[in-house]
Image (spheres, grey):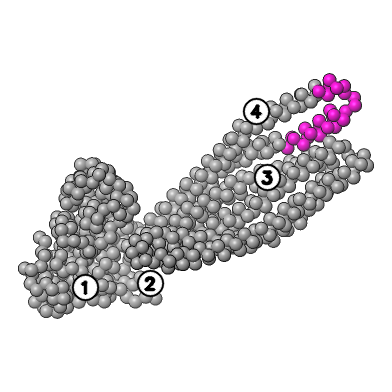
Amino acid sequence: MYSIKRYLEFVKPYKWKIALTILIGIIKFSIPLLMPLIIKYVIDDIIDNDNLSQAEQISELFWIMGIAFFLFLILRPPVEYYRQYLAQWTSSKILFDLRDSLFDHIQKLSLKFYSKTKTGEIISRVIHDVEQTKTFVVTGLMNIWLDMFTILIAVGIMLTLDPMLTLISLLLFPLYGFSVKFFYSRLRKLTRDRSQALAEVQGHLHERVQGMPVIRGFALEEHAQDEFSTHNGKYLDRAIRFTNWNAKSYAVTHTITDIAPLLVIAFGGYLVIGGDVTVGTMVAFTGYMDRVYGPLRRLVNASTQLTQSHASMDRVFEFMDEKYDIVDSPNAKPLERVHGDVSFENVSFKYDDEEEWVLRNINLTIPKGETVALVGMSGGGKSTLVSLIPRFYDASEGKVKIDGQDIRDVQARSLRDKTGMVLQDNILFSDSVAMNIRMGNPDATDEEVIEAAKAANAHEFISNLPYGYDTLVGERGVKLSGGQKQRVAIARVFLKNPPLLILDEATSALDLESEHLIQEAMNKLAYNRTTFVVAHRLSTITHADRIVLMTDGRVEEEGTHEELLKKRGSYHRLFQVQELDTPDESKVMR
């Protein structure tokens, strides 16, 4: 019930629209309830009325049919239209609000969450599970009430016709209610299990589609097919369990709703033979049985759909309740101006409490405008250290300060607004080149976008693309080379113009020409900014103001390129391994 209460918060703004929909629906469902009465009147008061002449019978028939055609041909269609339109409009607006809220939630979740959760599972909750909750609005808040009103009105009319026949028609209601409660108590769990299995299939499929070049390149098609079949089979198993239980419920409840009219026909026929009721009354009762048990059958279907909807609500709000690892303190203020001094004070970090320390007691002070290169073997903690600056993670111990202020005392979004990042694998969106550059500043003019591209050495290749800056780059920038993607990423940082800059393996795995162009652009970008460079290739960082060698999450050596070579320590050995004998032979980019 907790998830329903949460869901009703999204429904509340549209309560009057729902009330209006129900009111129009009552009119819409009330009109067909006149049909059995019309049939009874035609049989008992026109056809079987010996007091009327044939001409009078025909006249009465035309009058009653004229009224009926007006109701069903003129009045009912617009009523039906507005009921359907309002129901769908309201439910779609509620789903829009819910997805909007979920997307806002997604953007606040930490990178730690995304490192443990498959993208496909997140998409499944935002798309599939949210869509499933639509049933709760259309069926649970509208149709169920309409069906209940229909049953009440029909039973009321039946009581005026014949109380005894009405009692017989309702004889099986208690058995029906018990069977619904018995079967649908388990359907919620089965539905939830099925939805989770579907999310796992979607998560697995999303990963494999993204990794299709690897699958094809290593001829892993059969292995990938077996893996997918395993996940798909798990979903099939849970879907069949749900279907099995659901089919049993349908069999029992529909049998009950089929037997009830037979009881009415049998008892009604007996009363007609005895002369206690008219033929028209019995025919009308038979018609009302359909009006009573038809809504009951819909309520059976609604029970299944609401069970699915409830299970989907549970999954949606379970996701919405995912805790944020990075939360602004209540007194956090926006970071307005940044001078550029950065310091790490006794900083230690680990991703989870049960895991090993990734960073251990880091102490660094970087003044404004200095370029600091972080080097060392893989797993040394370089990328983790720079990810603390924009608060992708918070230090487990110690403090990270900007201009002497603990970054946990400022709003994370304003902090990231003052930080520019160029990574090894930069994400480009499947839109135009211009749009991807404009991610650095959505309000930038076309002229500013072009200037940023020129500064990043990207203007020439962009101009040679089929549609220039309007060329679509494909998903994750698949239509561009690695060097071209990097230059687009650098261009958007130029456009952002942040005081703090992080370059994380930005030139690794590139050809020499691309590396030269990108290194030149990054040197321009780093000018007069506090810059952190993470690199494996020492040739790209010999010009740095300071080089920090990290080993097992600790600072092992610190100094300029020349100072560290003179120490003949770990940096010197690493430099020798890369076959860089002297600074003159290195590819120094100034």
- Residue position for label 1: 376
Judge left or right: residue 263 versus residue 176. right
- Secondary structure beneath disc 2? loop
Q: Residues within 10 Å of mark 1 (few under 14, many from 20)?
A: many
Disc assigned to residue 74: 4
Judge left or right: residue 548 versus residue 118. left
Q: Name the residue: 20% across, 46% down.
A: 464
Q: Are marks 4 and 1 in contact (CB under 8 Å)?
A: no
Position of the N terminus by quadrant: bottom right
Specify the principal SS of the magenta part.
helix
Judge left or right: residue 387 versus residue 206. left
Nearer the observer: mark 2 or 1; the answer is 1
Inspect the image, locate mark 4, and give the three-letter code of the amino acid beneath it: Ile
Disc assigned to residue 542: none
- Residue position for label 3: 147
Q: CA distance from mark 4 to mark 2?
A: 68 Å
Q: Quadrant of residue 238?
A: bottom right
Where residue 503 appears, as percent x and y from the top left, is 22, 61
- Image: magenta residue range: 33-58
Q: Name the residue: 83% across, 49% down.
A: 263
Q: CA distance from mark 2 to mark 3?
A: 52 Å
Regarding residue 307, the answer to whether it shows in the image is: yes
Q: Are marks 4 and 3 in contact (CB under 8 Å)?
A: no
Q: Name the residue: 25% across, 69% down.
A: 382
Position of the C terminus by quadrant: bottom left
Where residue 494 appears, as percent x and y from the top left, is 20, 51
Inspect the image, locate mark 3, and give the three-letter code of the amino acid beneath it: Asp
Where residue 251 appears, as percent x and y from the top left, is 71, 56
Nearer the observer: mark 4 or 2; the answer is 4
Q: Name the residue: 81% across, 52% down.
A: 171
Q: Earlier in the sequence, mark 4 or mark 3?
A: 4
Disc assigned to residue 352: 2
